[in-house]
Amino acid sequence: MVGERTQADEVPPPEHLFTWVDVDEHLARLAEAAVQWPQWLLGADAWWDGLELVVRPATEPAEVHSWLNAVFGPGSVVTDGSHPILRLDDPRTPQPTGLPISLCVDDEMRKPRREPRLREKHITPFLAEPLPAPEVDGFAADVQLMAFHSFKGGVGRTVHAVAAADALAGQGASVLLVDADLEAPGITWMHRSQGGQLDFSYEDFLALLHGEEGGPEGAVEIAARYLPNQEAGHYPGPGSITVLPASRRVTLGPPRIEPADLLGPSRSSYFLTDALAALAARIGVQVVVMDLRAGASELSAPVLLDRRVQRVFVTTLSDQSLTGTCEFVRQLGRRSPGRRGLDPESSVVITQYRQDAHGEQVTEAQNLLGRALGSLLPAAGTSGADRNRDARDIDTDVLITAVKSPFREELLALPPGWNSVLAAVERASLKGVLQPVLPTIDRGRPPRTTSGERDIDALRGDLARTARRLTYAESEGLSSASGFLVTGPIRNLLSEHRTELPVALVTGAKGSGKTFTFVTLCAARTWSEFARRSEVTGVGLDAPIVPVLEPTALRQDDVTPQDLRDAFARERDGAVAENGFAIRDRLTRGVAELGEEDAVGWRKLWLRCLAGAAGLSAEQVTDPEEALMELGRRQQVVFVVDGLEDVFQTLDTKVKQTALRVLLVDVLGWLRSLRGRPLGLIVFVRRDLVGRAVHQNTGQLLHRYDSYALRWDEQEALRLALWVAVRAEALDQPAKAVTDLSYDELVTALTALWGRKLGTETSKEARSHLWVPAALGDFQGQVQARDVVVFLGEAARLSAQQKGWPDRVLTPAAMRRALLECSTNKIDEIRQENPEVGALLTHMRQYGGTVTVPFPLADVGLDTDQAEFLVRSGVFTRGDDGRYWVPEIYRHGLGFGSERRARVLWR
């Protein structure tokens, strides 16, 4: 254990030592850090009257004194007569005062009993190790424990605990809601104000357990006689909430028996949580929801330090609350990290923020909390198909759940009664907010919704082939683009241009679906037909679609972009349109011939390209502006441009930057200035290229077209996955209905594709619908469409090679392995499509196997400018400590390791 630590883990000497408490605290920190703890020191205890060190035989006092001076600061050990003392700070006297140092020799290091406390009783090197795991995985009768905790009071912890219990009961679960805040109870007051029974309390249960000689059976039996009378609310079906209030006492005061008082050598270290689970099982409850005492309190420690408990931390954006939560979570993580596949995922709820004012602060908070939760959430296991390191790392670095619960005025001053509080919870939609963190209740196997009774291997093969066809739109061609998923940006583009042709930018990151949208738009041939296929009504403009520039890799099948150009040109007296190669040559010559700042020259060149695509010959286009205006008087048309990356791959010269800026700003502006808007233009362009070409007012330009930007958040990524599966006929779901499903309906429909979890229904594995977008996404919750499709194809192919899991199309092991393949493929694709980013990724790959995320730039041989370029490109994000992170979709392909054991997702 000591050998695994580095100098970065060293604990600096304390600035002040006033009492033995300071000495004891510093020794505990040294033991936990391990790197400075010497081999000869077996244990240490500081008392009010002395410091006792347990050392191995033959340990010299001089060696002990030298170590104490090193870790407590030079001059800490002084000799008072013949007896050495550890000096304490006492400004009252110039004479040294402190704790007498005594050495106790022992030849054996005995491992002490470790208990789930925040403060250890005895300081030994074993403090550097986590607490011992519970002897039994899980709780009696598969009861689940969920504990809400906050570092600071007043952040909404109690109301979110109540909301979680209410949501679970509404879904048919039986819940035991425990008010474990023994010093400032909240749920107790709600229940009492409603007139609920308070025959038996948490204090009663603790006192009974404290008095038991053996197990909890006696206390459980007594509690089970009274708790049925303490139900709150009424729920249809089997759902119920039983309240265990903090106390029956009306007078306020500290508890007589605390949870830590139950710990003793004759009992399990996890006696309290085992007893609560036994009580829940006895009264037929499936989930125990606990509202714990705020702060770093021993009242909460025995629950929070049991890794089998699902821990939910609640915080606001307040610096005190946020920083305190992060530090407390790290401390818990050092003492009680989880085990992947055995222990539940922990999570965090960010409350009391305004969506219109705190966007950046919420993102920063998510990053901070994510890094803290990295020490706490389930660590990698070694079972089954996850025995190789790469596959084992996938879950451990993918899913941290940070649920965002925005400010709601009705929650500022809660009403007194239980029913009134639940009504406020309902109005604030808290149950929906908490859905991602609620434990899964076993309701039996979900119904099969795969296509009929077809063989599961056939479904997997069909999905693999369909996803492979859809991976690259340019490899398909126009005739294959008959069906597509209508997303929000497409709807916006059409609905905002029902009576006026579009002049717009459609931006997106690489792989976001720009070319696929371009292909489907061209395949529709007219603006009104594109609207009809997208099910957007009221679009009566029958303007033809004319591609000006297309990707060089676009498949040339029985319908091509040149066919669309020629068809439009023939309607004009049999004219012949300029082909795509000639248009691209025009642009290439422009890069070589035009000056760096020749905006006028580039505007005319771009307009000549539009005119040539429409069939206006060079002789007719002496003045491209006049030629296009004349065209507009005769006929409407929507020009479309894609494939700019093929012409301006690097934007490494000012000429290229000027060329692209003129198209994005000047040409669109000129077309928008034409009376009656006879000519439309849609430019598909990578978002990072916009930032590099347009140096002034970039944000304003992007904001203008923001509603058309191709972004895929978690919900839309799930929608795309379902759409691909339905298109492959791997699931029975009407294709048209996919666009109308709510988030919960999407999750349910996808259960037949990949199960509820990456494991069995009752396992502690990650939830599939959270894991997939998290594994494929970036730190802003954005997922690229191509990555989703590639992932589905690879996971289906790997699933077809396996047996078992007849209840789902994609198997858990295949999904994890597919992420590794997707990561490698993504980097290879970027090298071809974005040479600037690709060159930097190729450079970093040489450090694979030696770099751990997060890392300083020196570890990957990059400078600040290169790093900031990668930040803008979505490959890097910079941490608050100056180190850099890469998303999982890049990390595995780069071969980088990770210091986190976290499961990552931002909602």
Image (cartoon, rainbow, N blue to C red):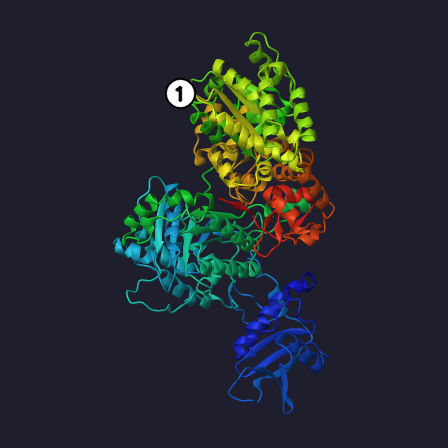
840 displayed left or right of 753: right
Whether 833 is drawn above or below 373: the answer is above
In the image as oriented, which residue stretches furthest toward the top?
Answer: 573
Q: Nearer the viewer, residue 794 or 40?
A: 794
Q: Which residue position holds label 1?
A: 538
Q: Amino acid at mark 1?
A: Gly
Q: Is residue 734 visible?
A: no
Residue at point 57% right, 20% down? 624
Q: Position of residue 458 (x, y in %)?
A: 61, 24
Q: Position of residue 746 (x, y in %)?
A: 47, 33
Q: Position of residue 205 (x, y in %)?
A: 38, 61
Q: Secondary structure at mark 1?
A: loop
For residue 315, which quarter of the picture?
bottom left
Whether 498 is drawn above or below 282: the answer is above
Q: Nearer the viewer, residue 84 or 603?
A: 603
507 displayed left or right of 281: right
Q: Nearer the viewer, residue 659 or 596?
A: 596
Dot 1, how many residues are within 10 Å of its Cα: few (below 14), some (14-19), or many (20+)? Answer: some
Whether 297 is drawn above or below 741: the answer is below
Whether 183 is drawn above or below 857: the answer is below
Residue at point 46% right, 41% down? 442
Q: Is residue 35 visible?
A: yes
Residue at point 58% right, 87% down? 96
Q: Position of residue 44 (x, y in %)?
A: 60, 75
